[in-house]
Amino acid sequence: MSAEPQIELVGIDKHYGEFHALKNISLTIEKGQFVALVGPSGCGKSTLLRSLAGLETISGGTMKIAGRVMNNVPPRKRDVAMVFQTYALYPHMTVLENMTYSLRLKGTSKAEANRAAEDVAETTGLSALLGRYPRELSGGQRQRVAMGRAIIRNPKAFLFDEPLSNLDAALRVHMRKEIRALHDRLGATSVYVTHDQIEAMTMADHVVVMRDGVIEQQGSPLELYDRPISRFVAGFIGSPAMNFVAATVSADGCSAGLNTAEGGAVPLSGALEAGRRIVVGLRPEHLRAVPENGQFRLEVGPVESTGSTTFISSADGLVTLVQSERTGLRTGDHIALTIAPEHVHVFDADSGLRI
């Protein structure tokens, strides 16, 4: 992958009246990179994407695409292609007409535009559907048409605004593989907005976690999973979500007593000040049930099995663990648990920041 920046954002601000939607956002996206913007509703991720597309006017900062400042450039001249969750296809046009529309607007001949559409249709698996209308297509096929329409323009960047949110679960899994495969085949630069952290983790090279208009943390998916900078990021990245348990550092500084009904303690990977109030983060997949001599115990609450995986929640709702095998545990049972010190995440009780 080239280190040449394709998108550069420096100090981006966006105000809606008194509301500060984007706060000093700086981000560099390399050519050929797939970047996911994630975060809860209202965090600013869609506003940032729409600002890149030129659909929103930024209040401050500098925005460059392929080295060119885009602050006051209208959307049609930015050479980016946006794929919406609603597909935004013209219902009265065939697949072929939808895909060639932008080329025809530029004055491309019908024959040349049709040849380009046929090439893109082959790439996107739409060759047999070029004569159909959107109403005759499935959700997945419509999404492929929307992507084909974007690809045919050969833009500087692809901007995806939650493109899979209207699809059912099985089709979402299939389409996220298709989108990533297309990205790789085209050598494209993609910015992908989603509220689904699994999409972000499985599709992106680089994940940007946003909160209240700022970038909370950015890095590779595994960097964010292994070393979340805050309790917020830790709770957002990973599925099932990380468990958070209030704790107090023990006298030796090398373990933390859990503030739970059944007590117990977990080991720490580094020494901390005795008596310090902390929150420990325990990923469900890192907890192990043991016959006896566990580090802590819990009373079993709901037990859910998918056949290959079992999800066990504590009766107080504080802790969930995941087992890859089936279990005979039932609600009301008591189990002992253990976790390796390198898997214990430690956060300050007040600030929520990683210690």
Image (cartoon, rainbow, N blue to C red):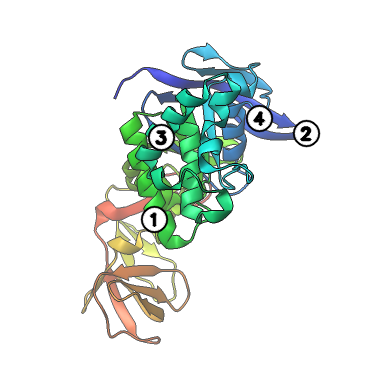
Residue at image point 45% right, 69% down: 318
Where is residue 96 drawn, in percent x and y?
50, 38
Element type where label 3 sits in the image: helix
The quarter holding residue 319 reads bottom left
- Whether residue 9 is visible: yes
Task: Kindly identify which residue carries mark 1.
Answer: 173
Q: Label 3 amino acid?
A: Glu
Where is residue 155 drawn, in percent x and y?
47, 24
Q: Earlier in the sequence, mark 3 or mark 2?
A: 2
Task: Please tell me the numbered disc located at residue 118.
Answer: 3
CA distance separating discs 4 and 2: 20 Å
Task: Kindly identify which residue carries mark 4.
Answer: 55
Q: Earlier in the sequence, mark 4 or mark 2?
A: 2
Where is residue 51 drawn, in percent x and y?
61, 29
Q: Label 1 amino acid?
A: Val
Label 1 or label 3, whichever lies nearer to me, is 3
The answer to whether 73 appears left or right of 19 in the picture is left
Q: Label 4 amino acid?
A: Leu
